């Protein structure tokens, strides 16, 4: 069964950085695009970023304004999200999600999420 | 950016009843690239439907999707206790890909 396990969330002060990880198993990680999607407390879903199967293409939500970087290590079956200059409105549960293909933007499996709280 | 508006915001129904959820797009969704997700409290979303009407693997046939252009519908033919949740539509045909704000299906 496909499994995605996020880690790295926590409480961080505004302006600081945080790196999230997502460990994938039970599928051929290196052949699928991967996404980060976030959900602020009590709010809806917001797509954050995607990376192609081989890491050669990366796309981001315009609202992030270059503060976040998505990456992957196919040798470790792991997806990352480097978040810099964090703001209070970045507070959310961050989900990693598997793309049905490479860049189909259909999220067919999701992790359980990791909570990031930006607060002083 | 395509804005997806879901209605109603909350749907109060009893088990066994039929649920009809609407998702309206601010402009036409390319090639019916519209998906539906279910999210239960404290859980991650789950893919139900893609391509407006194709059920994902393992999704019961009481869930069906329809529509094209700007108007899409998710129908749950007979609500089971486990179907009470929040449902989101998502368009993936145009950049940026966007979600609707969700419809909560609650027990009446």
Image (cartoon, coloured by chain):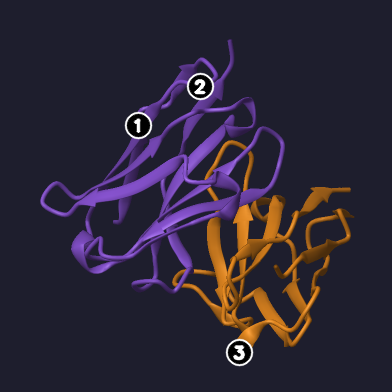
Chain colours: A purple, B orange
Q: Which residue is mark 2?
A: A15
Seen in the image, is B10 located left or right of residue A38?
A: right
Q: Residue at x 76, y 78 (%)?
A: B72
Residues beneath discs 2 and 3 located on the same chain: no
Q: Secondary structure beneath disc 2?
A: loop
Q: Tell me where residue B38 appears, x and y as whole percent.
A: 62, 57
Between marks 2 and 3 in the image, the one whose residue lies nearer the viewer: 2
Question: In this orientation, which residue lies closer to the viewer: A25 or A35?
Answer: A35
Q: Which residue is mark 1?
A: A19
Distance (Cα) linking label 1 and label 2? 14 Å
Seen in the image, is B54 located left or right of residue B89?
A: left
Image height of A101 relative to A16, above or below: below
- Asked where in the image residue A99 lies, by quadrant, the reply is bottom left
Q: Which residue is mark 3?
A: B31
Label 3 is found on which chain of the structure?
B
Q: Residue at x 59, y 15 (%)?
A: A119
Quadrant of image for the N terminus of chain B: bottom right
Between marks 3 and 1 in the image, the one whose residue lies nearer the viewer: 1
Q: Tell me where residue B26 appears, x and y as whole percent.
A: 81, 74
Q: Secondary structure beneath disc 1?
A: strand
Q: Residue at x 73, y 60 (%)?
A: B100
């Amino acid at each position: 069964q496909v499994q995605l396990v996020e880690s790295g969330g926590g409480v961080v002060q505004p302006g600081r950085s945080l790196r999230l990880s997502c460990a994938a198993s039970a599928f051929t990680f290196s052949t699928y695009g991967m996404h980060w999607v976030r959900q602020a407390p009590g709010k809806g879903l917001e797509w954050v970023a995607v990376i192609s199967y081989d890491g050669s293409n990366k796309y981001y939500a315009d609202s992030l304004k270059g503060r976040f970087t998505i990456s992957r290590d196919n040798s470790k079956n792991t997806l990352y999200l480097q978040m810099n200059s964090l703001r209070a409105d970045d507070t959310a549960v961050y989900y990693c999600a598997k793309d049905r293909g490479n860049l189909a933007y259909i999220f067919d499996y999701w992790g359980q999420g990791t909570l990031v709280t930006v607060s002083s | 950016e395509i804005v997806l508006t879901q209605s109603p915001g909350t749907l109060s129904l009893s088990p066994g009843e039929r649920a009809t959820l609407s998702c309206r797009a601010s402009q036409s969704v390319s090639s019916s690239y519209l998906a539906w997700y279910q999210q239960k409290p404290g859980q991650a979303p789950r893919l139900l439907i893609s391509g407006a009407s194709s059920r994902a693997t393992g999704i019961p046939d009481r869930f069906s999707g329809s529509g094209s252009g700007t108007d899409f519908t998710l129908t749950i033919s007979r609500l089971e206790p486990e179907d009470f949740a929040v449902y989101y539509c998502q368009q993936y045909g145009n950049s940026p890909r966007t979600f609707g704000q969700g419809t909560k299906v609650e027990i009446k």
